[in-house]
């Protein structure tokens, strides 16, 4: 928008300069041409009168005047008499069409600028010398060849000065336009900064109420909406915390009671019923935990920040390797990236994402299998993929895998809550990334994440 305002402002000034400067330059050019032509014609007419007088003194004065004219001006005088004789030391004019036209009885003057575009290298004016006793009889002609180099220099001065002036004015106009545009758009940039911080999860962002009345009203409205949204999210966080406490506590107490019942009875039928009830309580606990995690993810209460992806992966590996070793499964890391890339993610999101994906991969991996975590980098993204050697998923199952409460037999088994991949997608997309499911080479499932890459930290 700033660029468009500057371009519009400069274009408006350029049109104004063109409308006022170019006509003035053309007028000055035409005036210079007309004044020069009038001056040369006047000198040629005066010399023609001296030539027509025929007296020796007049012709001597003509020779002196022509010599002085050649010294003081860039013009040369040529003379032609009807009888072909010379006048003193003056050069003869060539018998071209202009001279022939002037020497004819009743001949007329001619003007030749040498070019239809401004002028050529010489201005040539030919004037007939008519007899004093008979104005229709021509006794000779006077021609002045006037070099236009001085005129061209003055012409360049006229146009060059105006061109430099136009460039200077346009430069000043661009600087003023940039200042005015930035001043006018400053409230919009502040509103955009506020919206950007909002999208990153910073609900405390507010915009200064500045600028025109319209932007001030918009800033007040957005600030009010931000305060309202902040209070709603705070209420939701309180609700999630209360729900977590209120739901987990009775479920834990119920499981303890069932364990006590199982320990205090010898009846196999009662023990079997208690074990079934315990498994349902465990499943319900997992479901509640998944719902609470999903609710926190949807609340998006924290802003994304640069995190060392490899550090997070190595930390989660240290947690999951004992479980993998117990199952006889190997967890391997493949790095296809230079250095240690930073990604933008909210604190704790990557941990939960890796926990869910590694848990699913470990559940479906066969004994002796391998879970491969690969990291590769692009210009603005870091790609993280987790491959297992399990049964994989069909295309139809992949299309539904991110739905809530959907459980695929090949992915999570019968004991899952159906919220793991839904939570993963919510966390990744909230941080500006993307997730997709693919078939792993050689069989199995590949969960592929595209994460936003953060700029390296400056200093230290």
Image (spheres, grey):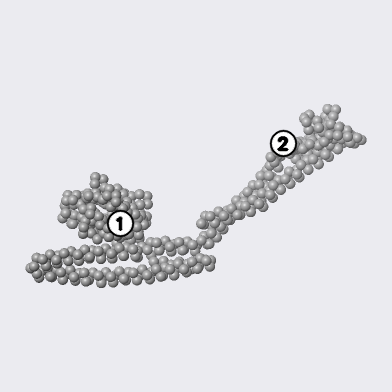
Q: What residue is shown at x 92% (from left), y 35% (from top)?
A: 133
Task: Place residue 95 in its image quadrant.
Answer: top right
Pinpoint residue 322: horizontal percent, then vertical percent: 18, 57
Residue sticking out furthest to the top: 84
Q: Quadrant of residue 232?
A: bottom left
Determine the CA span between mark 1 and mark 2.
85 Å
User: How crowded is the residue under tag 1: few (<14 C-alpha within 10 Å), some, or many (20+)?
Assistant: many
Residue closest to the eye, 143 or 406: 406
How many neighbours does mark 2 have within 10 angstroms: few (below 14), some (14-19), or many (20 or more)? few
Give the number of the mark in front: 1 or 2. 1
| Residue 459 visible in this rendered orientation of the protein | no
Q: In this orientation, which residue lies closer to the viewer: 163 or 208? A: 208
Where is residue 105? Give x, y as percent. Answer: 86, 32
Residue 134 at what x, y percent from top left? 91, 35
Return the mark for residue 402. 1
Q: Could you say which disc has been placed on residue 114 in the image?
A: 2
Q: Residue furthest left?
A: 266
Q: Quadrant of residue 278?
A: bottom left
In the current view of this chain or complex, which residue is farthest to the front?
A: 269
Residue ID at (78%, 39%)? 69
Q: Residue at x 81, y 41 (%)?
A: 42
């Amino acid at each position: 928008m700033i660029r468009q305002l500057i371009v519009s402002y400069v274009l408006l000034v350029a049109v104004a300069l063109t409308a006022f400067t170019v006509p003035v330059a053309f007028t000055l050019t035409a005036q210079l041409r007309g004044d020069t032509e009038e001056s040369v014609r006047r000198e040629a007419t005066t010399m023609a009168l001296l030539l027509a007088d025929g007296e020796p003194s007049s012709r001597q004065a003509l020779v002196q005047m022509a010599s002085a004219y050649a010294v003081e001006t860039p013009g040369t005088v040529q003379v032609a008499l009807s009888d072909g004789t010379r006048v003193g030391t003056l050069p003869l004019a060539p018998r071209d069409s202009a001279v022939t036209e002037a020497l004819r009885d009743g001949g007329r003057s001619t003007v030749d600028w040498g070019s239809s575009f401004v002028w050529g290298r010489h201005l040539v004016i030919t004037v007939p010398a008519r007899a004093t006793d008979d104005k229709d009889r021509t006794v000779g002609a006077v021609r002045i060849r006037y070099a236009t180099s001085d005129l061209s220099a003055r012409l360049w001065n006229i146009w060059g000065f105006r061109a430099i002036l136009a460039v200077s004015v346009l430069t000043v106009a661009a600087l003023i336009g940039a200042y005015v545009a930035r001043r006018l758009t400053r409230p919009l940039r502040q509103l955009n900064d506020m919206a950007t911080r909002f999208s990153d999860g910073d609900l405390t962002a507010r915009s200064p109420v500045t600028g025109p009345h319209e932007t001030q009203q918009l800033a007040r409205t957005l600030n009010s909406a931000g305060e309202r949204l902040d209070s709603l999210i705070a209420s939701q966080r309180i609700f999630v915390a209360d729900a977590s406490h209120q739901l987990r506590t009775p479920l834990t107490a119920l499981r303890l009671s069932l364990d006590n019942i199982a320990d205090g009875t010898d009846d196999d039928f009662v023990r079997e019923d208690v074990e079934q009830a315990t498994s349902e309580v465990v499943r319900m606990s997992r479901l509640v935990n998944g719902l609470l995690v999903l609710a926190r993810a949807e609340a998006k209460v924290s802003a994304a920040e640069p995190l060392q992806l490899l550090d997070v992966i190595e930390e989660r590996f240290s947690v999951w390797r004992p479980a993998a070793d117990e199952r006889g499964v190997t967890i391997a890391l493949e790095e296809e990236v230079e250095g240690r890339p930073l990604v933008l993610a909210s604190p704790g999101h990557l941990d939960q994402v890796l926990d869910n994906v590694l848990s699913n991969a470990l559940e479906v991996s066969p004994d002796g299998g391998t879970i491969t975590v690969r990291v590769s980098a692009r210009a603005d993204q870091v790609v993280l993929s987790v491959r297992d050697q399990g049964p994989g998923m069909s295309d139809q199952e992949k299309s539904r895998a991110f739905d809530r409460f959907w459980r695929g037999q090949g992915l999570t088994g019968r004991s899952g809550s159906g919220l793991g991949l839904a939570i993963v997608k919510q966390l990744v997309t909230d941080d500006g990334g993307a997730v997709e499911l693919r078939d792993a080479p050689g069989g199995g499932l590949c969960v592929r994440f595209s994460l936003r890459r953060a700029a390296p930290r400056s200093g230290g």
